[in-house]
Image: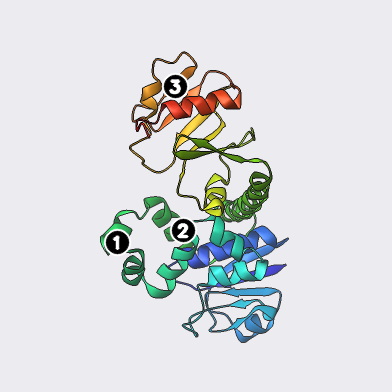
C-alpha cells in the first residue's frame, strides 16, 4: 500500500488537491497528516507532499518551501503525473492557485490588477469547510467519506482535463468560423456537451472579431446562439418576434431556436441580432 504524507496543522488547497490527484492515480493509498520521517523521504512508495523540504520526483518527494523558484506542491505533482501543461490551459484558476500559495494574496492581486479585497470577497465557504475538515484528521483510509470525496475529485479533475483536450482537437477539425456582418461566429455541431472546451478553442483561434458561438442547445432540440463577451452591438432580444426563436434571455445575451435549423438560417438569425448597420 502506498502512503501520502502531508503536513499537519492548517490545510490549504495546495496539499489538499495534490493529495486528491495522487489518490486518483494510485491503486491503494493512505493519507497521513504529520511531519515526514527520514524513512518516508527515502521510500518511493511514500509520496511526501508540501512538506519535507525536498523536491525529488524520483523518490516521490514534492515540497517547494526550500526553493522560492519552485511552484506549489500541487503543480509539482501535476508535472510528475504529466497533466501540468494541459491543466494550465484548461483551468483558469490553476496558475493563480500556485501564485496564491507561493507568493500570497497581496502579490497575486497585484499581478491580476485587482484590489486584494476582491480575492477575499470571492473566497468560498465550501473551500473553507472542506479544508478545515481535512485539517482535523491525522489519517484517512479508503472507506472514509472525505477520502472517497478526495479521490473522486482527483479523478474528475484528470478526466475533465483529458475530455477538454480531446474535444479541443475535435473542434479544430470540425468547427467552422463564418462571417456575421462585420463580426464572426464560430459554429460547432457536436451534440454531446456542446460547449465543452469552447473557451479553449476560442483562445486557440485568437480572433477578436469572433463575437458569437452557435452550438446545439443542451436544453432542447434547437441551436443555442450565444454572445461572447459583452458586446453591446449584439442583442438577441431583437429576435423576439421571430417564430423560429424558442427562448431569449432577458438580458439579450443568449437565444435558442425551436428546431435545428440549417446552418445558413441560424447564421441569418445571428446577423439580425446585430444592431449596428455596419
Secondary structure at badge 2 equals loop
- Specify which label sits upstream in the sequence, 3 or 2: 2
In terms of image quadrants, where is residue 99? Answer: bottom left
- Specify which label sits upstream in the sequence, 3 or 1: 1
Q: Residue under circle 3?
A: 247
Of the residues tagged 3 and 2, which is closer to the observer?
3
Q: Residues within 10 Å of mark 2 (few under 14, many from 20)?
A: few
Would residue 28 appear left or right of 164 to someone viewing this image? right
Q: CA distance from mark 2 to mark 1?
A: 15 Å
Residue ID at (52%, 29%): 267
Q: CA distance from mark 3 to mark 1?
A: 36 Å
- Percent position of residue 58, x then y: 69, 80
Secondary structure at badge 1 equals loop
* Mark identifier at residue 114: 1
- Specify which label sits upstream in the sequence, 2 or 1: 2
The quarter of the image holding the C terminus is top left
Would residue 135 appear left or right of 40 to someone viewing this image? left
Residue ID at (55%, 69%): 75
Position above or below: 248 against 206: above
Q: Residues within 10 Å of mark 1 (few under 14, many from 20)?
A: few
- Percent position of residue 229, x then y: 40, 44
Residue furthest out toward the top: 243
Q: CA distance from mark 3 to mark 2?
A: 32 Å
Would residue 231 appear left or right of 191 to someone viewing this image? left
Say which of 196 and 100 sits in front: 196
Secondary structure at badge 3 equals strand
Of the residues tagged 2 and 1, which is closer to the observer?
1
Cβ atoms under marks 3 and 2 closer than 8 Å: no
Say which of 235 and 60 sits in front: 235
Q: Residue under circle 2?
A: 93
Amino acid at each position: 500500500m502506498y502512503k501520502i504524507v502531508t503536513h499537519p496543522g492548517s490545510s490549504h488547497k495546495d496539499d489538499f488537491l495534490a493529495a486528491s490527484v495522487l489518490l486518483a492515480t494510485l491503486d491503494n493509498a493512505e493519507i497521513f497528516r504529520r511531519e515526514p520521517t527520514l524513512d518516508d523521504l527515502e521510500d518511493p512508495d511514500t509520496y511526501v507532499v508540501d512538506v519535507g523540504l525536498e523536491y525529488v520526483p524520483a523518490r516521490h518527494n514534492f515540497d517547494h518551501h526550500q526553493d522560492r523558484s519552485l511552484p506549489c506542491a500541487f503543480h509539482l505533482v501535476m508535472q510528475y503525473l504529466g497533466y501540468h501543461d494541459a491543466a494550465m490551459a484548461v483551468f483558469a484558476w490553476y496558475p493563480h492557485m500556485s501564485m496564491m500559495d507561493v507568493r500570497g494574496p497581496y502579490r497575486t492581486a497585484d499581478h491580476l490588477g485587482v484590489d486584494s479585497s476582491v480575492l477575499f470577497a470571492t473566497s468560498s465557504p465550501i473551500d473553507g469547510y472542506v479544508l478545515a475538515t481535512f485539517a482535523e484528521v491525522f489519517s484517512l483510509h479508503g472507506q472514509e467519506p472525505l477520502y472517497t470525496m478526495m479521490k473522486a475529485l482527483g479523478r474528475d479533475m484528470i478526466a475533465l482535463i483529458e475530455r477538454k483536450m480531446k474535444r479541443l482537437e475535435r473542434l479544430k477539425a470540425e468547427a467552422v468560423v463564418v462571417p456575421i456582418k462585420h463580426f464572426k461566429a464560430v459554429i460547432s455541431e457536436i451534440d454531446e456537451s456542446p460547449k465543452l472546451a469552447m473557451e479553449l478553442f476560442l483562445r486557440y483561434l485568437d480572433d477578436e472579431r469572433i463575437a458569437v458561438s452557435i452550438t446545439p442547445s443542451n436544453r432542447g432540440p434547437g441551436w443555442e446562439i450565444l454572445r461572447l463577451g459583452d458586446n453591446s452591438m449584439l442583442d438577441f432580444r431583437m429576435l423576439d418576434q421571430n417564430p423560429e426563436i424558442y427562448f431569449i434571455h432577458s438580458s439579450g445575451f443568449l437565444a435558442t431556436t425551436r428546431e435545428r435549423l440549417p446552418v445558413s438560417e441560424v447564421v441569418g438569425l445571428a446577423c439580425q441580432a446585430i444592431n449596428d448597420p455596419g
